[in-house]
């Protein structure tokens, strides 16, 4: 998995999203089936995600209820994200804006049927989001090290610097709990290792 995609996946997960990365969109050609493109991130969040973490012998432990405001997430709606991740400018590739690609992704995930997908794609291409008849919202998000002006894009964009800053703040806020856990996720696990090393250096007086 690409390093930047891994960071974005970790960021979306701690904000309550289910995620799929590098999702292949297949198309039928004269010579068979081929991959039209890969979508960097597809993510899905239910309203209220992250409220409680079950505990042994207790009804639940209050966890993190708020979502990073930079996400622009509709808290009272199901939110589906079609995400593009770049290490440079936060832009959306032509393939990820392609009508056939968006239609295939939305229909295959079951978020809207053939009767509604055309309008949804129109909305995504024109304004970067669409509200479905079933009440949930679909959005196009771009992540990158640099943000281009809003006037030059029709989608929401988030800086990778914000992604890293949020993850570091999340670790710091919940360190007493998270420090006892093991994480196999490459980006989050690496940030955990850095935080352990940093705190160990402070304890040993090596940060001077």
Image (cartoon, grey):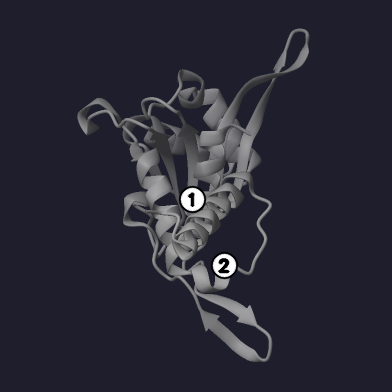
Which residue does the image show at 45% across and 28% down from the upper left? 86
When the figure is inspected, residue 65 is found, relative to residue 126, above or below; the finding is: below
Give the CA distance from mark 1 to mark 2: 15 Å
Q: Which mark identifies residue 140?
A: none
Q: Quadrant of residue 108?
A: top right
Q: Which mark identifies residue 11?
A: 1
Give coordinates of residue 130: x percent, y percent. 40, 44
Which residue does the image show at 43% across and 36% down from the upper left? 119
User: Relative to the observer, which residue lies in front, 173 or 118?
Assistant: 173
Quarter placement of the N terminus: top right
Which residue does the image show at 42% across and 46% down from the upper left? 164
Does residue 150 show up? Answer: yes
Which residue does the image show at 67% across and 91% down from the upper left? 57
Give coordinates of residue 17: x percent, y percent. 53, 55
Q: Closer to us: mark 1 or mark 2? A: 2
Q: Which mark identifies residue 178?
A: 2
* N-term-proximal mark, 1 vs 2: 1
Give coordinates of residue 179: x percent, y percent. 58, 67
Does residue 17 show up? Answer: no
């Amino acid at each position: 998995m690409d390093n930047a995609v891994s960071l974005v996946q970790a960021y979306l997960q701690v904000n309550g999203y289910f995620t799929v990365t590098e999702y292949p969109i297949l198309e039928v050609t004269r010579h068979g089936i081929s991959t039209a493109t890969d979508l960097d991130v597809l993510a899905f969040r239910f309203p209220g995600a992250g409220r409680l973490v079950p505990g042994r012998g207790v009804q639940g432990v209050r966890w993190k209820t708020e979502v990073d405001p930079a996400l622009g997430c509709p808290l009272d709606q199901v939110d589906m994200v079609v995400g593009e991740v770049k290490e440079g400018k936060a832009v959306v590739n032509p393939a990820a804006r392609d009508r056939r690609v968006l239609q295939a992704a939305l229909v295959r995930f079951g978020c809207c049927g053939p009767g509604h997908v055309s309008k949804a794609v129109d909305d995504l291409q024109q304004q970067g989001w669409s509200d479905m008849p079933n009440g949930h919202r679909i959005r196009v998000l771009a992540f990158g090290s640099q943000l281009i002006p809003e006037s030059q894009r029709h989608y929401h964009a988030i800086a990778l610097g914000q992604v890293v800053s949020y993850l570091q703040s999340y670790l710091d806020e919940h360190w007493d709990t998270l420090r006892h856990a093991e994480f196999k996720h490459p980006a989050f696990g690496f940030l955990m290792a850095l935080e352990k090393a940093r705190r160990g250096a402070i304890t040993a007086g090596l940060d001077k």
